[in-house]
Image (tube, rainbow, N blue to C red):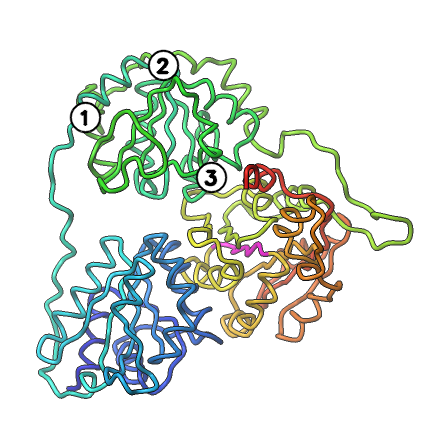
Amino acid sequence: MRVAEVVGRVLYGHGARYVFGVVGSGNFHVTNALVAAGARFVAAAHEGGAASMADGYARTSGTVGLLSVHQGPGVTNALTGLTEAAKSRTPMVVLAPEATAPRSNFFIDLPALAASVGADFHRVRATHAAEDAGAAYRAAARGATVVLGLPLEVQQTETEPWSGPVPAVAPPPATAPQVEPLLAALQAARRPVFIAGRGARAARKPLTRLADACGALLAVSAAAKGLFAGNPWNIDVAGGFATPLAAELIGEADLVVAWGSTLNMWTTRHGELIPPSAVVVQVDHDPAAFGVNRPVDLTVTGEVAAVAEAVLGRLGAGPAGPVEAGTGGWRTPELAQRIRDHGRWRTVPYRDESGSARPGAPATIDPRTLSAVLDDLLPPDRTVVVDSGNFMGYPSMWLDVPDVAGFCFTQAFQSVGLGLATALGAAVARPDRLTVAAVGDGGFVMSATELVTAVRLALPLLVVIYDDAAYGAEVHHFGPDGHPLETVTFPETDLAAIARGYGCDGLTVRTVDDLGPVRRWLAGPRTRPLVVDAKVCGARGSWWLEEAFRGH
């Protein structure tokens, strides 16, 4: 049996059930070995799209994503999506064939490439193929993006067949977290707030119980949106996307505990959201994350769920024990009512700017109005995937999600153009849910080629383009200073027609009434993706972007 076949069998044996990619000579045999073992191969139009699909699949399914590409340009084509995955700590294995001869036109320094974007690197050896492939998968399952080098000459080497066993993914070494200082801070606080980040996505239950025990309010970073969905004390996203009420309440906190969040500038509004008088605690499994973005008063090393459980145990409020009211004093009926009435952007008044900018001009729709109407139309059981751009706060904040797996935010690398393909991976992971890809017109044009893949998959997918005929972020960054904007503005384009050319249903929306076909599509069999080209108002920058650009 050749090494390439062993690698495919080992990865399938460890749990790989889907592999996304573009097949060339270098990854032909290892991909076919996965398929022969029982995995499903999803053929993308471009390696960049395949990388984002694997990323979206892994984030939404909670399992390891698998990407298979050709040597050399196949790897470099995938690099932006790979970087987004690595910076998001997505569990993913990249099958990367290697031309090891330095004079080969396919040669690239794979270990250096992986290190440069924050990914791990493993290489398969002819004499240890099963061991090396399994180690790469287990490293990914523990939360790493792994580039698995597959030297071309090694792939063809004959080796012993592999049939198991499959070693279990070893949990991190268990050490009792030192929680006494955190416990004391929680007991002393009158107005505690928890901010949960990406590292807390699996810790909803213990964090909710601990918040109940100490009277804390619950907030999240944008990457963890949906974690506390449905909780009456959830004030949703902190930072630039925060509602006025959330910003007010966090600004009144006397204790802020960051659970698996580094409290970056987006989560803290450049540090201004958290009051200087508040005690700030950071809980993270990685000590290197402590204080990287702002000073903190107290740190606790450990997995978020384990730390929360340890504190609950000290409070006598373990999984089966009662939860006593904590010292936090602001969980009042009056505050609960305020959160119900004003805790969502849907409840914040605004002046609807839909209509024509000038007499005779085509109408445009306010992105807030568009998002609110869509939120009412769409089924509650949904996955929302948001690309990067000026528009992204509107779908992120106006479209509710049922849980943390229902929201996928492609912002770790802040690249435009990853959202559509990421949504395809999410739709593969959760075909039982409607997947909504929210993209800007710039990001759509960059990634529209993957509509071919969307049509092939025939998955329930709604693509909403927030189309302002521009790179809106640049328009609103440089425009106020009088800079010329011809390089970042574009003629109006019929993007719905482009979508129809790929085999999707396409719809142009300028008014609320134009959204009627969306309702009919939702009621139908949904065998083809629907692309909505929403011509949105572009007269002003989004609120979060205006704030982000301050001082830049």
Return the mark for residue 179. Answer: 1
- Disc 3 versus disc 1: distance between alpha carbons? 28 Å
Provide the secondary structure element on which disc 1 rests.
loop
**How far apart in space, not on screen, are marks 3 and 2 (Cα)?**
27 Å
201 or 165, which is in the foreground? 201
Mark 3 or mark 1: which comes first in sequence? 1
Disc 1 residue type (three-letter): Val
Q: Which residue sits at x=59%, y=59%?
A: 463
- Occupied quadrant, residue 290: top left
Using the rendered image of the protein, determine whether residue 238 is visible from the camera's viewpoint: no
Q: Which residue lies at the image location 45% right of the left edge and 48% below the top edge?
A: 406
Q: Residue furthest right?
A: 359
Residue wearing tag 2: 328
Disc 3 versus disc 2: nearer the observer:
3
Determine which of the numbered discs, if any, sits on residue 278 in the image. Answer: none
Instruction: Report the amino acid beneath label 2.
Output: Gly
Say which element carries label 3: helix
Q: Provide residue 90's location: percent of width, then percent of height.
A: 33, 55
Q: Specify whether residue 522 is painted magenta.
A: no
Q: Which numbered disc covers residue 266?
A: 3
Against 129, is 373 above or below? above
Q: Earlier in the sequence, mark 2 or mark 1?
A: 1
Q: Is residue 460 above or below residue 225?
A: below
Residue 123 in picture, x, y percent from top left: 19, 72
